Image (cartoon, grey):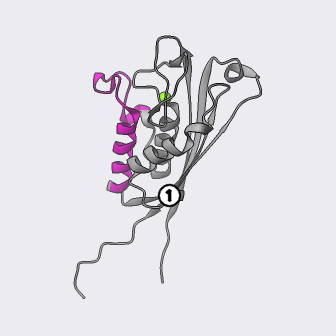
Amino acid sequence: MTETDFRTGIGFDFHRLVENRILVLGGIRIPCDKGLLGHSDADVLVHAICDALLGACGLDDIGIHFPDSDPAYRGISSLELLKKTCALVDANGFRIVNVDAVVLAETPKIMPFRREISARILQAMRAAQPRAFNLKATTTEGCGMIGRGEGIGAMATALIERRPPERDGAS
Ligand code: MG
């Protein structure tokens, strides 16, 4: 009999859009007259994904593992944080089944960059299955802080599965 042990997690993040910052979403630079403000590269999408994965593992959140008070993370590519997060998932005996995410932004349009972003995320997660990551985007139809272009939000869910016990190699 095969036992399965699935866990789910959710992540949400929001960063303010400000001048004189480069906009990085999903590990790539996206042309925009503003960028997201933050201690790292402020990649709101990757932060939401990290939080979903950490939540699924029952391992607190991104602020606990990679605090913005730590100079080591100043200006760091958030893809590096995602790689460290995936290493934690692995070290705790889990593998990623899939991650689903949505970016909430009035501008710029994210969908033209969907394939490039997905490739970066899949690479950082070391996912062999292309459908292990899915990206969507929406506006808030001009309403609220996102609609006014004051910032960009992102949400993600993650499903992870406990790996089967390692065989000892004996046949
Ligand atoms: Mg963040």
Question: Label 1, on which residue?
Answer: 130
Q: Where on the picture, by quarter, is residue 80?
A: top left
| Label 1: element kind | helix
Q: How many marks?
A: 1
Could one spot residue 169 in this view of the protein? yes
Q: Mark 1 belongs to which amino acid?
A: Pro
- For the stretch drawn in magenta, the main secondary structure is helix
Q: Residue at x 36, y 44 (%)?
A: 83
- Taking the spot 47% from the left edge, 63% from the top edge, the residue there is 161
Residue 159 in view of the camera: no
Q: Name the spot of residue 35 as percent of width and height, x first.
A: 51, 19
Q: Residue furthest bottom?
A: 171
In this view, the residue farthest toward the top is: 19
Above or below, 29 against 119 in this view is above
Q: Residue at x 50, y 46 (%)?
A: 118
Residue 168 at x, y = what percent?
Answer: 23, 78
150 shown above or below 168: above
Q: Is residue 158 above or below residue 43?
A: below
> Which stretch is magenta?
63-90
Does the segment drawn in magenta span residue 152?
no
